[in-house]
Amino acid sequence: DAKTTQPTSMDCAEGRAANLPCNHSTISGNEYVYWYRQIHSQGPQYIIHGLKNNETNEMASLIITEDRKSSTLILPHATLRDTAVYYCIVRVAGAQKLVFGQGTRLTINP
Amino acid sequence: DAGVTQSPTHLIKTRGQHVTLRCSPISGHKSVSWYQQVLGQGPQFIFQYYEKEERGRGNFPDRFSARQFPNYSSELNVNALLLGDSALYLCASSPTGQVYGYTFGSGTRLTVV
């Protein structure tokens, strides 16, 4: 399993874009980048995933570098409800389990 | 549509006791996976079941066991509880057992005293 590296914590002002980085320099060609978040005392929530192209959905955008060794999750207009631990996970398409690291604790400040 | 439901939401057990946690997957999902999340850490994979068969097992002792029923619901059993088993136990369901489509429940908070 490719290893990911994320900052331990980040702060962002409400209404601004939150940019969460993730390094995955050992990623293989068939591994996807997944992002989940976990709000306090709840189960992890799927946000977005991608292989090599940038992806966008109603929650966030995922920017993957051309060499695929790093990615950035962007929450375009952060709200207080986006305060959570964000996990970047690298997995092959047919993987049967997720391997979570420590994640980034994102705090949105009013 | 109901999401993944887990019961109970909280429980307290004494060291040495046995506990059973339950999970009902999203309708139509045939796979259930169990994760343990100790305070301050990310979730750790325990088991996956698909079509009532065990398809994967994490690095947990034999005190941990699980099963999946014909209606695809699942139970996680832990025997001879230790203080270190105190954690949030998460269940995730998916249509085919692959991580794409994973949906987690809110978990069962187990405290061992």
Image (spheres, helix red, strand yellow):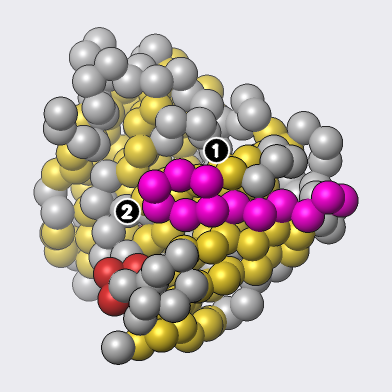
Say which chain tag 1 marks: A
Q: Going 52% across and 82% down the picture, which residue do you hit?
A: A10
Q: Earlier in the sequence, mark 2 or mark 1?
A: 2
| In the foreground, A78 or B66 | A78
* Gap in angstroms between the C-alphas marked 2 and 1: 15 Å
Residue annotated with mark 1 = A97
Q: Secondary structure at mark 2?
A: loop
A23 above or below A43? below
Left/right placement of residue A62 relative to residue B78 reads right
Name the amino acid, label 2: Gly
Left/right placement of residue A79 relative to residue A23 reads left
Residue annotated with mark 2 = A43
Q: Secondary structure at mark 1?
A: loop
Q: Going 15% across and 29% down the picture, which residue do you hit?
A: B1
**Residue B99: percent from the left, percent from the top?**
52, 33
Q: Going 21% across and 36% down the picture, which residue do you hit?
A: B3
Mark 2 crowd level (few <14, some 14–19, many ≥20, 10 Å Cα): many
**Residue A100: percent from the left, percent from the top?**
55, 56
Q: Is residue B15 visible?
A: no
Total residue callouts? 2
Say which chain tag 2 marks: A
**Residue A6: percent from the left, percent from the top?**
64, 70
Contact between labelled residues 1 and 2, with CB atoms less than 8 Å apart: no
Q: Which residues are magenta?
A: A56-67
**Residue A62: percent from the left, percent from the top?**
59, 52
Is residue A100 magenta-colored?
A: no
Name the amino acid, label 1: Lys
